[in-house]
Amino acid sequence: MKLLEGKTALITGASKGIGRTIAEKFAEQGANVAFTYLSSVEKGQALEKELQAYGTTVKGYRSDASKFEEAEKLVNEIVSEFGTLDIVVNNAGITKDGLLLRMTEEQWDDVLEVNLKSVFNVTKAASKIMMKNRKGAFINMSSVVGVQGNAGQANYAASKAGIIGFSKSVAKELGSRNIRTNVIAPGFIRTEMTDVLDPKVVEGWEKDIPLKRAGETEDVANACLFLASDLASYINGQVLSVCGGML
Ligand SMILES: NC(=O)c1ccc[n+]([C@@H]2O[C@H](COP(=O)([O-])OP(=O)(O)OC[C@H]3O[C@@H](n4cnc5c(N)ncnc54)[C@H](OP(=O)(O)O)[C@@H]3O)[C@@H](O)[C@H]2O)c1
């Protein structure tokens, strides 16, 4: 039995990295998959083709999760094309790093809008259909940085800590409607986002991680699959770290 048979999922930011692997895993596990991308149009279109091999309904949408109206339009389109929406993974995210004294207002605003406001936008739009259905699951992608902070990432850490506070509140508001809201806090995962880091910094981190390795996108996707599935039916308002023991 596939874990997500008959369910419809939306994954934001799935053109690459963690989101892409989640989309693949969900389709493999029987879900109908709607996903978004923004600048990586070719990668988004290629993923849509790839996912068709799993035999469920799949569609990629070019949609900016940080824009309230776009998120609302996206959810309405998904509901009219797929018929419903059961699972949302708020995964879209960016970094614009810099030490506080050098950080510009634009760096702050961009990161907060893409990483945190997007979660509000998509969750608000999707919660309406889930409330009607009296079931649903949100999985919001935070980071260990949102829990412990990181020099040079005050904007990113604030956005990821904000996701935790937001999710815990929404879990309390929507729990009575059988809608679960949980958070994943990945540690250091190999993707294009972390490819830009100085190899020396990466080496230092790997030494400090009790499992002595960076995480793979599949490590996060497996946790996400669990939280999205009925195996996690009594888990709500929690933060699951996927960090090899880093936190
Ligand atoms: N990698 C790590 O070590 C790590 C650790 C902790 C947390 N995380 C979090 O995990 C999530 C995925 O990270 P990743 O490493 O997979 O990053 P990534 O490889 O850079 O992928 C980011 C994804 O987000 C999409 N995206 C960016 N802005 C968007 C917007 N405004 N609207 C819709 N989609 C947008 C990108 O789409 P386009 O390319 O099409 O624009 C891309 O598909 C992020 O929230 C990140 O903060 C990552």
Image (cartoon, rainbow, N blue to C red):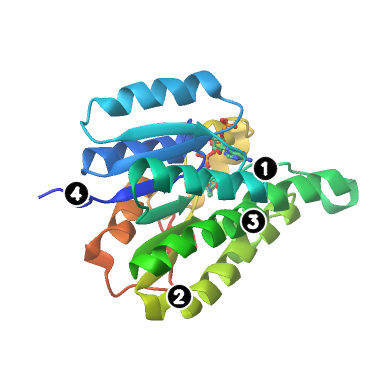
- Residue 36 position within the rendered picture, expressed as x and y whole percent measured from the top left: 50, 37
Label 2 amino acid?
Leu
Helix, strand or loop under label 4: loop
Q: Crowding near pointer 3: few (<14 within 10 Å), some, many (20+)?
A: many
Indicate the position of residue 170 as horizontal and vertical percent values.
52, 72
Secondary structure type for disc 3 = helix
Residues at discs 3 and 1 in contact (Cβ within 8 Å): no
State which tag comes first along the sequence, 1 or 2: 1
Alpha-carbon span between mark 4 and mark 3: 30 Å
Q: Along the polypeptide, which appears first: circle 3 or circle 2?
A: 3
Does mark 1 have its CB less than 8 Å from ligand 1? yes
Return the residue found at the far left: 1
Q: In the rendered view, would you say 63 is above or below 168?
A: above
Instruction: Determine whether label 3 and label 2 are within 8 Å by CB.
Output: no
Residue pointed to by mark 2: 174
N-terminal of the two: label 4 or label 3? 4
Mark 1 is surrounded, within 10 Å at the Cα level, by few (under 14), some (14 to 19) or many (20 or more) other residues, namely some
Q: Position of residue 94 (x, y in %)?
A: 64, 42
* Frontmost residue, 54 versus 133: 133
Picture coordinates of residue 144, whole percent (x, y) = 54, 58
Q: Earlier in the sequence, mark 1 or mark 4?
A: 4
Disc sitting over residue 116 in the figure? 3
Query: Is the Cβ of the residue at disc 1 closer than 8 Å to that at disc 4?
Result: no
Residue 216 visible at all: no
Closer to the camera: disc 3 or disc 2?
2
Query: Image point 48% across, 22% down: which residue?
Result: 43
Whether the residue carrying mark 2 lies under 8 Å from ligand 1 is answered with no
Say which of 30 and 83 sits in front.
83
Up the image or down, 227 lies above or below 134; here it is above
